[in-house]
């Protein structure tokens, strides 16, 4: 957890301390009176306490979610031209194989052409930053839909990276007894696979943003808790 998250947590803790001071006074009055006013004070104190706690927690989560989006979007900007280059590279290999014939045997795509595409595709690095950011999301929101959405973004980024690393490859698909000089024994990648995976990856990022926003805007301060057992305070009024 970095400095920005720590600052957010410190601010939340300060709010929480103030809320606890006020809550203690209200709870003390309720303990001795046992009246409806005292019970109302307990509910108000509980709401203040949970409100401050919720604010601190959501502030930290918001920072972590925002950094995950930033990491994903930055990697996406690098991956976009790489996916486009992979499409053209796979197309070039496919067309190259189609023009080969058995008489001339298998010949790889011209190295100068391949190297031009290779440089553009390899410009994008591994999505390690997304993986690291996803771990921070897990730390802040374990068990939530936000974590599952972040994991989906990570998986699609890794898959896209794998496809980019395999771009421009002519795969030998024939049985072992078939000669590797036979051009028909090779198959090119589907040229559309990298752009299609990039689109899926971008959709996963959008899904994460929506799920994260819903998570941050959803509040559950009225759930039953230890401080809501008014009957307990009533029993102690005597």
Image (tube, grey):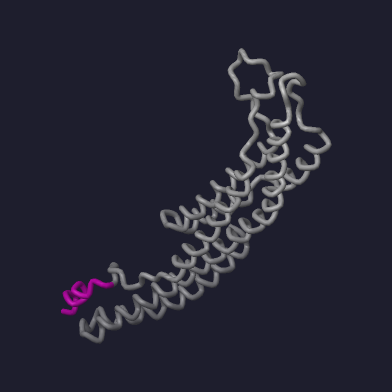
Residue at (76, 46) in percent of width and height: 120
Horizontally, is 101 left or right of 135 in the view? right
Front residue (pair 41, 84)? 84
Residue 236 left/right relative to 92: left
- The spot of residue 17 in percent (x, y) is 46, 74
Looking at the picture, tell me which residue is in the foreground, 163 or 229. 163
The quadrant of the picture occupied by the N terminus is bottom right
Which segment did they paint magenta? Answer: 228-238
Q: Position of residue 221 (x, y in %)?
A: 35, 72
Residue drawn at (64%, 23%) of the image: 185
In the figure, residue 74 lies in which quadrant? bottom right
Residue in front for this viewpoint, 97 or 157 = 97
The number of callouts visible is 0
Look at 48% across and 55% down and name the residue there: 149
Predominant secondary structure in magenta? helix
Q: Quadrant of the C terminus?
A: bottom left
For the point 41% across and 75% down, the residue is: 51
Residue 237 is covered by the magenta coloring: yes
Q: On screen, 86 above or below 221?
A: above
Residue 234 to residue 119: above or below: below
Q: Position of residue 159 (x, y in %)?
A: 58, 43
**Is residue 125 within the magenta segment?**
no
**Foreground of the two, 164 or 168:** 168
Residue 75 drawn at (x, y percent): 66, 53
* Residue 219, quarter of the rendered image: bottom left
Asked which quadrant contains residue 194, the reply is top right
């Amino acid at each position: 957890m970095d400095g920005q998250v720590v600052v957010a947590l410190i601010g939340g803790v300060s709010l929480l301390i103030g809320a606890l001071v006020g809550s203690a006074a209200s709870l003390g009055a309720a303990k001795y009176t046992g009246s409806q006013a005292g019970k109302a004070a307990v509910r108000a104190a509980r709401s203040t306490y949970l409100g401050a706690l919720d604010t601190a927690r959501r502030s930290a989560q918001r920072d972590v979610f925002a950094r995950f989006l930033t990491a994903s979007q930055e990697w996406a900007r690098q991956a976009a031209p790489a996916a486009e280059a992979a499409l053209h590279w796979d197309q070039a290999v496919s067309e190259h194989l189609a023009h080969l014939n058995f008489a001339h045997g298998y010949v790889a795509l011209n190295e100068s052409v391949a190297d031009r595409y290779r440089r553009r595709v390899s410009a994008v690095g591994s999505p390690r930053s997304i993986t690291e950011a996803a771990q921070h999301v897990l730390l802040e929101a374990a068990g939530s839909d936000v974590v599952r959405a972040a994991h989906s973004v990570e998986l699609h980024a890794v898959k896209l990276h794998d496809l980019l690393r395999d771009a421009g490859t002519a795969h030998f698909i024939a049985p072992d007894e078939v000669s590797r000089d036979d051009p028909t024994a090779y198959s090119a990648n589907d040229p559309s696979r990298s752009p299609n995976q990039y689109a899926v990856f971008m959709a996963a990022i959008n899904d994460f943003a929506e799920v994260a926003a819903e998570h941050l805007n959803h509040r559950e301060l009225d759930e039953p808790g230890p401080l809501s057992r008014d009957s307990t305070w009533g029993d102690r009024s005597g």
